[in-house]
Amino acid sequence: MGSLTLTLQLVKEEIPVKQQPLRLSGDIKTGLVLVDVVNGFCTVGAGNMAPTEPNEKITKMVEESVSLSKKFAEKNWPIFAFLDSHHPDIPEPPYPSHCLIGSDEGKLVPELLWLENEPNATLRRKECIDGFLGSYEKDGSNVFADWVKKNQIKQILVAGICTDVCVLDFVCSVLSARNRQFLPPLENVIVSTEACSTYDVPLHVAKTNKDWVSHPQELMHHIGLYIACGRGAEIASEVIFE
């Protein structure tokens, strides 16, 4: 057993993530939030932040996100999709240039392009890690908050990438806004384990470049879920439609 496997096992034992199946019916108004399921993070070779080779965890995340999106669309339930989209002259340190405005990197993965014409879907391009902050307009209004209010959403199911970065920042901000009663009637924030993933930079790879930081995929995915849970989110091990 490798050292990373032992570390992951220890972490899961010491800080387990409380999760359970999520059963969805029409009884509670639920909205699906997709975070950055775009080429720049998911499609092999698409850019600086994209996987350099097929990645099983990211492939699984995309498949689950597509499956959830289709189920929500079939039921005419609301969908909100964030698309990372950056101006070339405004960097986002510590990350390299990625998902520039107008590039293919900033487009939804091919399996989700149909959302552009889906009447129940709202697409929002964001120029920052945190989609909640990225939903603010110059007049002070918030597109995500308006979506929640317009659709009278009581709970959101969050999917996408990266579990410990954009997904986590969004979830934490939404939970804080909910606690301050800025997002009525939202009550529950749920993160899907299977429909989320993060990028992978193993230690031996990080050591080859002084500007890189080790980011073991499965470990950071677990930590992201753990922190989200600690902030008040529910974690769904699977999603069951009734």
Image (cartoon, grey):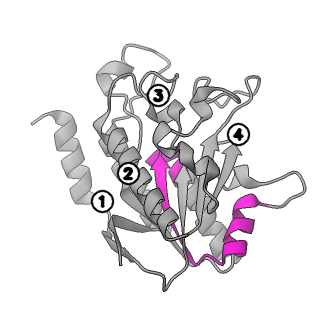
Q: CA distance from mark 2 to mark 4?
A: 25 Å
Q: CA distance from mark 1 to mark 3?
A: 29 Å
Residue positioned 47% across, 49% down in the render:
160
Q: CA distance from mark 1 to mark 4?
A: 32 Å
Q: Nearer the viewer, residue 187 or 118?
A: 118
- Secondary-structure class at tag 1: loop
Q: Check disc 3 and report the residue beneath it.
A: 50
Residue positioned 51% across, 33% down in the render:
39
Using the rendered image of the protein, determine whether residue 182 is visible from the camera's viewpoint. Answer: no
User: Mark 2 touching mark 1, by CB under 8 A?
Assistant: yes
For label 4, the crowd category at 10 Å Cα-Cα, with few meaning under 14, some 14 to 19 and many 20 or more, is many
Amino acid found under the numbered disc labelled 1: Ile
N-terminal of the pair, mark 3 or mark 4, is: 3
- Secondary-structure class at tag 2: helix
N-terminal of the pair, mark 1 or mark 4, is: 1
Q: Position of residue 59 (x, y in %)?
A: 34, 40
Q: Check disc 4 and report the residue beneath it.
A: 127
Amino acid found under the numbered disc labelled 2: Ile
